Every structure is written in C-alpha cells, then in structure tokens.
Image (spheres, rainbow, N blue to C red):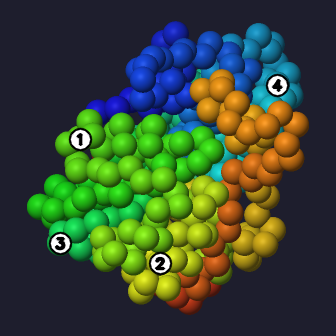
Amino acid sequence: MIKTLEWTDSGVRFIDQTKLPTEETYVTCKTHEQVADVIRKMVVRGAPAIGVAAAMGIALGIKNSKAATGAELKQEFERICDLIGKTRPTAVNLFWAIRRMRQKFEYFRMRTIPQIKQELIEEAQRMHAEDIAANQAMGRHGATLMPTSGGVLTHCNAGALATCGYGTALGVIRAAVEQGKKIHVYADETRPFLQGSRLTAWELMKDGIPTTVISDNMAGAMMKQGKIGAIVVGADRIAANGDVANKIGTYTVAVLAKEHAIPFYVAAPFSTIDLETSNGSTIPIEQRNAREVTHIAGKAIAPEGVEVENPAFDVTPGKYVTAIITERGIARAPYNESLRKLAEEPAVASI
Ligand code: MRU
C-alpha cells in the first residue's frame, strides 16, 4: 500500500508528490514549519491528505514545544495553527483538522504538558486511520454506481496519494474493480500540475487497473465517442447546496457530462463537506504561481512576461452532480436536505 504520509518517531514522513512518477522519494519533516512548507509546495496534496498533514504538523509542533506552562503551550498551539492554516485556502479539510485538534487541546487543557502532547499525537494518528476507513466505506457505497464494464473518467488525483490510503474517487473505482467490474480508467492529465498523468496513472498502474491518460481537451471527444460510461471525481470543499469545489477543469467535465447524459459523481468524506457554507460562491479559490502554467519541468512553454491566470480550483454547481458519495452513504439532490440528513448518521470508525 502507498504510504502517502505517516507519523514516525523521527517526524512526519511524506512521499514527495512533486517528484512522481519518475522518482519515488520521501521527505521527513522534523518541525511544523517544514510541514507547512510541504503542504504549500504540494509535496503532499489532495484535500484529505492535507487535513491529516495539518493535524500531524500541529502534533509535531506541540511535541517539539519547550513551553513550561499550560498557558505558554496554548499560545504556541495557536501560533502553530495560524501558520498551518495559511498554507492552502480551498480544501476545507485543513480547517476541519485544525478545529478537531483545537477541540482536543481544549478538552485536555488541564492535563500535564506530556499528557497533552501524547493526546494530540494520538488524535492525529486516529485521523489518519479514520481517513482510510472512510475511503473504504465510500468505495463500498460508490462501487454500486459504477458500470459493470467500460470507461470511467476521472480528473486530477483523488486516490491513495490524495488521502491516507485507498482514495476517494479512485477508492470507488478500486472497490468496483475488486467486485469484478471491468473498468478502464480515463485519467485527465490535469494541467497545469499534471496530477492526472503523473499521480493517478502512477498509482492505478501500480494496482494493475487499466488506465489511459488523455489531455484535458480530449475529454469531450471521448464522451462523444461513447467511451465514458461514468465520471467520478473528488472534492476540496462541498457547500451545503451541493456545489463542489475541485481541481480546475472539473466544471468543464461536469458540463460536458450533462451534454452527453453521463452520470457525474463526486466522492468525498464528511471532512470535505462544509455545511456552514451555503453555496459555492463564497468558497475561497487558491491562485497559484504563474510559473506552474508557463513552465513544465523547469522549461518555458510560454513567452516570458505573458499574462497568466492560475486558479487551482473551480466550482461545479450542484445541479451537474448526479450524486455525492460519502462514507455515510450516497446523497442526491436536493443536497441541502440529503447532506444534512447524512450528517446526522454516525461517523465511520477506524478499524
Ligand atoms: O491542488 P491539489 O492537487 O491539492 O488538488 C487536489 C484535488 O483537487 C482533488 O481532486 C481533491 O483534493 C480531492 S482528493 C481526494
């Protein structure tokens, strides 16, 4: 199994996703500043993985703390959360993780400093295990929606690499394949960061799942040719009305799906669902460096000085989403009702 991130005695260890697929290397962060940096640089990426990385970063910062009193530790805790909270704005899992770590801190505030440290480390590790269990549950629910055979399109990487293991959208595909469905994945290459060609193709090939990489502008033609029976993507934040923020280009795929009457599914854990945000219009969209668009592997592919836009995400209106697959079950429109109803179901416990 791919170890996207893990807590070790010497720090938090990440597979370096900026180096894949040509190099499989790992980096170990020894401080919370280093964890913030690997989130910002997308060494670790994907909403659920970012959330758990944030939790582990907080636990690491507190573990390293020299605070002598509870009050000092609390001040340091807030400084660490503030730094980690400023790394990437769109994936709500980051803020969900900070909130959960803060609740833990408050709950154990009166304990000794070594006890508080231990509780936070355990909480971050629990979140890691819960994420894998949630993905497996999502896979069980979502596999029923996958065709028995044929092409399934995905955009970006919502796999083991974007989570603590198994994946959300790719978890649904993995579960369908485990059930004997003969699925052939079409992976959008996902410009400009190429999560589809570099990461999705890499992890699916490792699992022996048939995969074809296409450039993003080929998706419509593939749909028109009847090669795509379903689409499944992940999400960075889902608003209460079912609007979905996900990797830039997802909106285009969803509109094309509607035109071709192909079901468009979103797979995401409850840590990605933001019921406090009523619709997608207020979701903050991260703008990234122009160089990601103008350069590939350090080589210029656009004239120097050209104007560039580089929003990392877009928002797909809920009306294009056939269903949202969560670890607690499947939600369908109207999402304002179905998501709130699922939110009342018990959370999936880790094994
Ligand atoms: O910029 P990234 O690579 O962090 O964006 C990742 C995505 O958009 C994923 O589709 C999303 O986080 C879901 S991952 C299970």
Q: Nearer the viewer, mark 2 or mark 4?
A: 2
At horizontal 54% and vertical 42% (from top left) the residue drawn is 194
Give the spatial CA distance, label 1 vs label 3: 19 Å
User: CB under 8 Å between callouts 4 and 1?
Assistant: no
User: CB under 8 Å between callouts 1 and 3?
Assistant: no
At horizontal 83% and vertical 33% (from top left) the residue drawn is 304
Return the disc, 2 or 4, that comes first in the chain's sequence.
4
Q: Can residue 134 be seen in this view?
A: no
Question: To which residue does mark 2 refer?
Answer: 257
Give the spatial CA distance, label 1 vs label 2: 27 Å
At horizontal 78% and vertical 72% (from top left) the residue drawn is 281
Snapshot quadrant of residue 178: bottom left
Give the spatial CA distance, label 4 vs label 1: 42 Å
The location of residue 87, given as percent across then percent down, is 75, 37
Question: To which residue does mark 4 refer?
Answer: 76
Give the spatial CA distance, label 2 vs label 3: 19 Å
Give the spatial CA distance, label 2 vs label 4: 48 Å
Identity of the amino acid at label 1? Asp
Which element is circle 3 on? loop
Which element is circle 1 on? loop
Identity of the amino acid at label 4? Glu
Identity of the amino acid at label 2? Ala
Mark 3 sits near ligand 1, with its Cβ under 8 Å away: no
Question: To which residue does mark 1 refer?
Answer: 207
The extreme front residue here reads 303
At horizontal 38% and vertical 68% (from top left) the residue drawn is 222
